Image: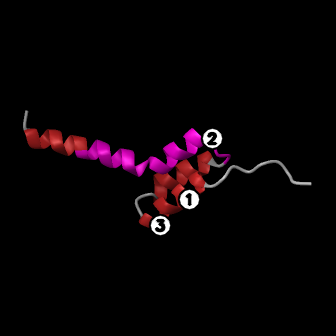
Amino acid sequence: MNINLIFVFLGLIAAALVYFVPAVVAFSRGVPNKGSVLVLNLFLGWTLVGWVVALAMAARSAEQGPRY
């Protein structure tokens, strides 16, 4: 097996892991809009702006109950 093919395969796996960091963060933190983060990351994550917005949505604090 060609060693270059192995490096390409490992590079693709690493790129996919980095690409889906916002979705992983959202699901691990249990934010209420995790589905929206996943969809935004899936369809607009290839743009830097979409990826940053998805990460910001995943990292924001979870909404708590109403304050009285």
- Our reading of the magenta stretch's main secondary structure is helix
Left or right for 37, reference 8:
right
Give the farthest residue toward the left. 2
Q: Nearer the viewer, residue 28 or 36?
A: 28
* Residue that badge 1 annotates: 56
* Residue that badge 2 annotates: 30
Numbered disc 2: secondary structure: loop
Q: Which mark is residue 48?
A: none
Disc 2 packing (10 Å; few <14; some 14–19; many ≥20): few
Numbered disc 1: secondary structure: helix
In the depicted structure, whether residue 11 falls above or below residue 60:
above
Q: Residue at x 30, y 42 (%)?
A: 13
Q: Is the C-beta separation of discs 3 and 1 under 8 Å?
A: no
From the image, which quarter does the N terminus lie in?
Answer: top left
Left or right for 12, reference 54:
left
Give the farthest residue toward the right. 68
The stretch in magenta equals 11-32
Sequence order check: which comes first, mark 3 or mark 1? 3
Give the amino acid type for the residue marked by disc 1 in the picture: Ala
Q: Report x, y in % for residue 40.
A: 53, 55
Disc 3 packing (10 Å; few <14; some 14–19; many ≥20): few
* Residue that badge 3 annotates: 49
From the viewer's perspective, is the residue at label 2 or at label 3 nearer? Answer: 2
The Cα–Cα distance between marks 2 and 3, rounded to whole angstroms, is 23 Å
Asked if residue 25 lies in the magenta stretch, the reply is yes
Sequence order check: which comes first, mark 2 or mark 1? 2
